[in-house]
Image: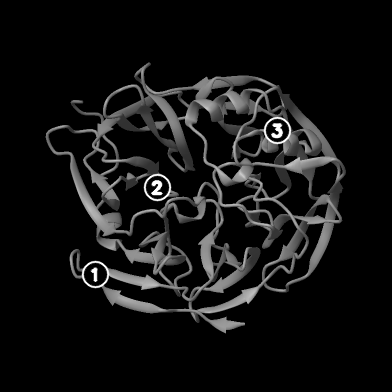
Amino acid sequence: MSSTIADHHTDAVTARQIRQFTQGPAHHYPLYYFIPSITADARDMIVHHVRDQIVQLHRLDLVSGQCHPLTDAADEGLTGWAIWCDPLTRGVYNHLSALNLRHNEVCYFQDTNGEAELWTVNVTGGRQRRIVTLTGRLPIAQNAFSPDGETFVFIHTDRASYLSSLDERTGGLQTRAGNEEHEQWRRRTPVTVSAIDRSNGVIRDVLHLDFHVHHVLFLDDRTLLFNHLRNGLGMWTHDLATGEQKTLGSTRADHHIVHQVITRRGVLYEAVNAAAQPPTYRLGRWDPITGHVEDYPVPAGGYLHTGHDPEGLVPILEDAGPTAHTLMVVRHLADKSRRQIVPIRDLSLYPARGQRYHGHPFLGPAPGQANGRDWLYHTACVDGTAQVCAVDVADLVRHCDDWRVGPV
């Protein structure tokens, strides 16, 4: 256990309060921002702690600043996210863990004697138990719990074939290959999507796909939302009860969805026209109940991530370009005449490589508060290491103007 809060200051440019929760030579970053990292009581955040090429999960007390280890995985393993992560050789699989809000526990993968194992750990009590050993299989994508906390869904593939295919690529995990080469590799990497019933531990295969998908989420307790189509960018749903599938897209055929977040008011996403020079982006929302889709152009200087507002009211963007890296809020998104970009914080540029350095912004309660969305949590590069930070954006949240249909 160690005290980690490093800084609490006012930004000189935006005059916003910034709190840096972690510090030191280790990298710290939350779970993948598509899924929750903050516990239901808003007391703790689950974070990755990476030092000396060892990944562990820690519980960060958002009030006291104390950081408590949750895992002690030691065997050799993989990032589980080729090729977008730096290679890590020991500990918990990077970016593959998921927090169960209903039962206050975290599921994670680790290697033991050359086999991937799924474990769970209680957030406050620290009790660990092994769920299953994936003999001959390898988890390779971001996973999720159903909203009711009773089903864990994960993506895995044949271990030997996957490792062999990585070795065939130039530099293996060491090289971030070009996008087209990566898409070709995805199309020849079959995966299985499996679900585990928490009450009895029964595992069932949900889907067998002849291509690699990077993310699976729960739209509701029976509907899965996937990131990536077989032939490129996009998102689609699968109904666990009926098997029905739907492909979802932007309002413009030349724009393709890259990232998406699930909110109370539908799925927020950004879509890119990568063929344009420079690429153009649209920020949108899809209502799964009515099927209504709306998206609007947003300026971008680099690679975009849609930020996560659980209520789906505040359009948040992370824009990582070659010369600037900014967190921002878009006001009056649906009204071209009033549309406004509000800078929240300028971040350091990404290092040359490293998925962990994405800002991945999401709204959450202020430290010490049981609920709310007043702070924008994110990962920032501080002196060469990834650290957990937050910015006070209460003024923007409380005066948000929801998306209203207006002139594009």
Q: Nearer the viewer, residue 298 or 398?
A: 298
Along the polypeptide, which appears first: circle 3 or circle 2? 3
Residue type marked 2: Gly
The answer to whether residue 16 of the structure is visible from this angle is yes
Q: Find numbered disc 1 in the image and state the secondary structure of the residue it sits on.
A: loop
The residue drawn where x is 62% and y is 47% is 147
* The image quarter in which residue 250 lies: top left
In this rendering, the answer to whether 201 lies above or below 372 is above
Residues at circles 3 and 2 in contact by the CB criterion of under 8 Å? no
Q: Nearer the viewer, residue 159 or 309?
A: 159
CA gap, disc 1 and disc 3: 46 Å
Residues at circles 2 and 1 in contact by the CB criterion of under 8 Å? no
In-image side of 134 versus 273 (left or right): right
Along the polypeptide, which appears first: circle 2 or circle 1? 1
Q: Nearer the viewer, residue 74 or 2?
A: 74
The residue drawn where x is 18% and y is 26% is 407
Along the polypeptide, which appears first: circle 1 or circle 3? 1
> Which residue is denoted by mark 2 in the rendering?
307
Q: Residues within 10 Å of mark 2 (few under 14, many from 20)?
A: many
Q: Quadrant of the N terminus?
A: bottom right
Residue type marked 3: Ser
Image coordinates for residue 40, horizontal then vertical, percent: 57, 62
Residue 165 image label: 3
Image coordinates for residue 269, horizontal then vertical, percent: 41, 35
> Which residue is denoted by mark 1 in the rendering?
11
Q: Nearer the viewer, mark 2 or mark 1?
A: 1
Way the structure is coloured: one colour
Q: Residues within 10 Å of mark 3 (few under 14, many from 20)?
A: few
